[in-house]
Image (cartoon, grey):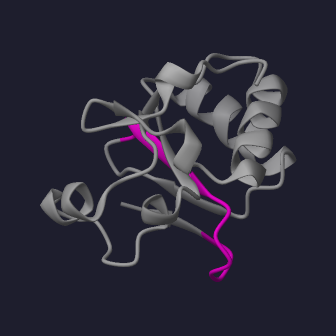
């Protein structure tokens, strides 16, 4: 990967890069290039235990398959750059937190959607 280090993919203090979907990793790197702004990953692969401990997480979360990431976002300009990069890279499932502090992107085979958390 050009823009990410293996250490950025972690869950419960353990590196989980090897649990990530290869296509997602390729798309994520491409999205980062298109966005031309750093991506800070806040959630990557999740264990069932970690996923179940989160308040609003879906029981069939794409994070469980390594097909999803959450990206930190602190302002509207950066949010627009990240979302545009994700779409250009082929992501068709994007969630934006209502507080605007993170963006979820996944390449799961579920229905294409853009949603708010």
Tell me which residue sits at (35%, 51%) in the image: 98
**Residue furthest bottom in the image:** 111
Question: Taking 26 as reference, is 96 above or below it?
Answer: below
Please state the horizontal and vertical placement of residue 21, each as a whole percent of the image.
Answer: 66, 54
Left or right, 41 with respect to 59, comes to right
Tell me which residue sits at (71%, 18%) in the image: 3
The quadrant where residue 82 appears: top right
Please state the horizontal and vertical placement of residue 4, each as a whole percent of the image.
Answer: 64, 21
Tell me which residue sits at (68%, 62%) in the image: 107
Question: Taking 97 as reference, is 37 above or below it?
Answer: above
Please state the horizontal and vertical placement of residue 106, each as a whole percent of the image.
Answer: 60, 58
Left or right, 92 with respect to 13, comes to right
Q: Which residues are magenta?
A: 100-113
Is 46 colored magenta in this rendering?
no
Please state the horizontal and vertical placement of residue 38, each as a whole percent of the image.
Answer: 62, 16
Q: Quadrant of the N terminus?
A: top right
The quadrant where residue 36 appears: top right
């Amino acid at each position: 990967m050009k823009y990410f280090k293996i250490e950025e993919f972690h869950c419960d203090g353990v590196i989980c890069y090897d649990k990530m979907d290869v296509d997602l990793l390729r798309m994520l790197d491409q999205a980062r290039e298109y966005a031309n702004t750093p991506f800070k990953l806040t959630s990557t692969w999740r264990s069932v235990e970690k996923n179940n401990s989160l308040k609003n997480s879906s029981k069939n979360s794409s994070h469980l398959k390594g097909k999803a990431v959450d990206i930190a976002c602190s302002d509207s300009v950066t949010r627009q750059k990240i979302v545009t990069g994700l779409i250009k890279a082929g992501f068709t499932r994007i969630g934006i937190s209502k507080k605007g502090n993170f963006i979820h992107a996944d390449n799961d085979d579920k229905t294409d959607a853009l949603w708010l958390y």
